Image (tube, helix red, strand yellow):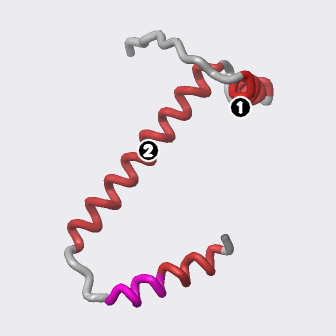
Amino acid sequence: MATVRKTITLTDAQDDWIKSQVANGDFTNDSEYFRDLIRRDQEKERALKAAIDEGLASGPSTRSIEDIWAEAEARYVASGE
């Protein structure tokens, strides 16, 4: 797999955070940390697109807005957030 070198600018606080992640042993170097962030973002993007496709494929809902809202509120309360 070919690699491309990138240059980025970070704040001191961001650099300290990345260094702490490497020092904790979570990553072997800065590049590994950034690649992990990119992989996570890619996975979230794929999951979001899959959810949108599933929603579109399911067709229109027969539930009312009030029913949908009540279900969403119930899920939120159950999640404890």
Picture coordinates of residue 6, whole percent (x, y) = 48, 13
The amino acid sitting under disc 2 is Glu
- Up-down relation of residue 30 to residue 47 (above or below): above
- Up-down relation of residue 3 to residue 26 (above or below): above
* Residue pictured at 79% horizontal, 24% vertical: 23
**Looking at this view, is 13 or 60 the one in front?**
13
- Pointer 1 residue: 26
Picture coordinates of residue 8, whole percent (x, y) = 55, 17
Picture coordinates of residue 62, whole percent (x, y) = 25, 88
- In the image, 58: left or right of 34? left
- Up-down relation of residue 23 to residue 58 (above or below): above
Q: Which of marks 1 and 2 is nearer the N terminus?
A: 1
Could you tell me which secondary element the residue under label 1 belongs to? loop
What is the quadrant of the N terminus in the image?
top left
Is the stretch drawn in magenta largely helix, strand or loop? helix
Could you tell me which secondary element the residue under label 2 belongs to? helix
Q: Distance between the residues labelled 1 and 2?
A: 19 Å
Circle 1: is it few (<14), some (14-19), or many (20+) Cα within 10 Å? few
Magenta range is 64-71
* Residue pictured at 74% horizontal, 28% vertical: 13
| Residue 25 in sight | no
Figure quadrant of residue 28: top right
The amino acid sitting under disc 1 is Asp
- Pointer 2 residue: 43
* Residue pictured at 21% horizontal, 67% vertical: 57
